Structure formats: C-alpha cells, structure tokens
Amino acid sequence: MFVGEYNYSLDEKKRLAIPVKFRKDFKAGIVVTRGVDSCLFIYTLQEWQKLADKISKLPINQANTRAFTRLMLAGAMDTKLDSAGRMILPDYLCQYAKIQRKVVITGLYNRLEIWDETQWANYQKRSEEESQTIAENLGELGI
C-alpha cells in the first residue's frame, strides 16, 4: 500500500527518484500516465493491468469513456527504474502536470501521484477549505 507525501526534485535530465520504501514494488516495471487534477499517476505493472482491463470493458460509444481512455492510455509510458531508483519523465507529461523542478510524490493506496510542488500546495489549500463539505458527503457513503 502506498501512503504519504514525499518531496523530490527533477534533475537536469528530468529524472525523478521514487521513494526508497516503494522501489521494490516497481522492480518489474512502472507505468506513468496523465492523471486527473493536473497530476501524474504512477502504477506498478500489476495495478496498471487491472486498470487497463477495466478501461477496455467500458462502452466506446460514450464520449466520456473515449475521453477517459485517451487520457489514461494514450498518455501512458512504461519504463523501468534505473539503478538509483529513478525514472525519466517525458516532456509531454511534465507539461501536462505543469511540473517545473520541485515535485511532491503522494501515495494513494494502489498508485503514486506526482504533483508540481506549487500545484500540490494549491490543491491542498482548496481541499482543506472544503474539508467539512467533503467529510459530510463521504458520510453519506458510509465512510
């Protein structure tokens, strides 16, 4: 399970280190793709396969399905971590997530997210301001 927040910086070659405690989970490979809320999603190969299987079963005659499929699959890149536990982030993904140099990696159970540091701070501020409403809505779901 991935949890927590970790601050890192891209190096000059746009390599990003994955937190040490998670590197073993990505030994078989890593998939990074466009996420939602202007961040990137990182999956293990096993979790990526589960998601891709679910996406492949969605009805392609619905515009939202096609858009989500394109967002997740067309933007995906599979890679491996180097010996220092780093991966390269391609320009198109950095542009999508507005990543400059400093990033925050967040653990969200079955995936990691990569956020530009400023984008993450803005997102957190908005979420914290709406925390009461969010909590009440989740209460309706039994959480």
Image: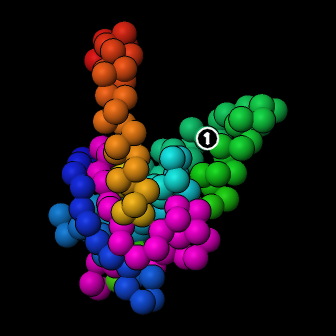
Given the current orientation, which residue lies at the most extreme right position?
61
Judge the density around disc 1: few (<14), some (14-19), many (≥20) Cα neighbours within 10 Å: some
State whether residue 133 is above or below residue 120: above
13 or 72, which lies in front? 13
**Drawn side of residue 27 relative to residue 66, left or right:** left
Q: Is residue 26 visible?
A: yes
6 or 24, which lies in front? 6
The verdict on residue 89 being magenta is yes
Q: Could you tell me which residue is drawn at 31 percent across and 54 percent down? A: 106
Q: Measured from the top left, where is residue 16 in percent x and y?
A: 36, 76
**Drawn side of residue 91 relative to residue 127, left or right:** right
Given the current orientation, which residue lies at the most extreme bottom position?
12
Q: Could you tell me which residue is drawn at 36 percent across and 63 percent down? A: 117
Q: Secondary structure at mark 1?
A: helix
Q: Is residue 77 visible?
A: no
Judging by the rendered image, the residue that carries numbered circle 1 is: 55
Hey, what amino acid is under mark 1? Ile
The magenta stretch is: 83-109
Q: Could you tell me which residue is drawn at 45 percent across and 89 percent down? A: 13
